[in-house]
Amino acid sequence: MMDSYYPPIKYVISGHEEGMLLKTILQQRMGVSRKLLSRLKLTEKGIMLNGERVYISVKVKTGDVVEIRMEQERSDDILPQPMDLDIMYEDEFILVLNKPAGVIVHPTHGHYTDTLANGVVHYWLQKGWNYRFRAVHRLDQETSGVLVIAKNPYVHQHISEQMIAGTVDKRYVAFVHGRPEPADGDIDGPIDRDPLEPHRRIVTPSGYPSLTRYKLVAAYRDASLVELKLETGRTHQIRVHMLSIGCPLIGDPMYRHPVYSRVSGAEWASSANTDPLPPVLYEKVARLDERIGRQALHASSLTLVHPMDGRTVQFRAPLPDDMNRLKAWLHEAERARS
């Protein structure tokens, strides 16, 4: 058993809580999950009342101090690897990064190095800290922006519960082909795997409920800058939803503009017409896609309640260089046309 713990999380019993079971305080007041409670019960200093180890069946009194301690952990299954990290915020409980495009968050089968987790584990070890890598949400490899990492299971649990409850405000910005109609709206389209290509997702009536809210920020002749808010967190949700309304993300190699297919939607051709789409349209779309080497999607901000002190905290990541270059090119193209 490990003999070092993270700093204790404390709770002081108030007058109206006198006589309650310690178990009730832990679960209903401190929000300790059943899984974490089981772990704490098995550790020597996991659950303490006024500095003493006790059973969770005892009754508490006004002024009692409840403490939970979690054993320090390490991600021994993740190879430490030096990496430049853009740290936006860090305290004893969370680490917030501005993730660059092109970096996978967590090692996967066949891809054990060059992930954000490798870099974070190396950074912590260099500082002499023992934490297990726990990303509380996901970003696709080619999506940049705000990523939150929890430093212990209690914090991970509480932020995950906020995610499930829909109280975490996640905002994205994206450059898309065309212009959404209406300019502001909701995309309420169930998402599930594509039965023909399981690594892709599609909008289908039998899918899982999925809701994306979007707002037009800037309109160009052949493209738009939109802000998006996720109300659900399905895999590839923004990419799938924007494609479903005819405004796929610029540069997205998986959810490509229909112009790349011989048969497109009703906007350009009927299903009976197998001729290629007009070359001029293809050229416009391809020229935009070539301006950026990945889907033009950035997690611009994330707002949540800090699990330890109840503060509402917001983290903002500026637009990355490649999307700024795309934005400048679109502005210049508009000026040239006027």
Image: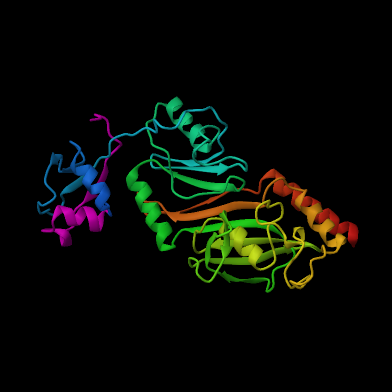
Is residue 104 magenta-colored? no
Which x, y percent locates residue 272? 76, 72
- The image quadrant where one finds the N terminus is top left
- Residue 257 at x, y percent in the picture: 72, 59
Q: Is residue 284 visible?
A: yes
In the image, is residue 14 part of the stretch drawn in magenta?
yes
At x 48% / y 30%, what residue is drawn?
A: 123
Q: How many marks?
A: 0
Q: Which residues are magenta?
A: 1-30
From the top left corner, tell me how far across and down residue 131 is, in percent: 38, 35
**Is 267 on the left or on the right of 124, as rendered?**
right
In the rendered view, tell whether residue 105 sits above or below residue 197: above
Determine the residue positioned at 68% across, 47% down. 294
Determine which quarter of the picture holds residue 187.
Answer: bottom right
The colour scheme is: rainbow
The quadrant of the image that shows the C terminus is bottom right
Give the vertical position of 161 relative to 71 (above or below): below
Q: Residue 16's x, y, as percent? A: 17, 62
Which residue is located at x 36 percent, y 53 percent? 158
| Of the pair 150 and 283, the residue shown nearer to us | 283
Q: Is residue 309 visible?
A: no
Question: As drawn, is 24 to the left or to the right of 322?
Answer: left
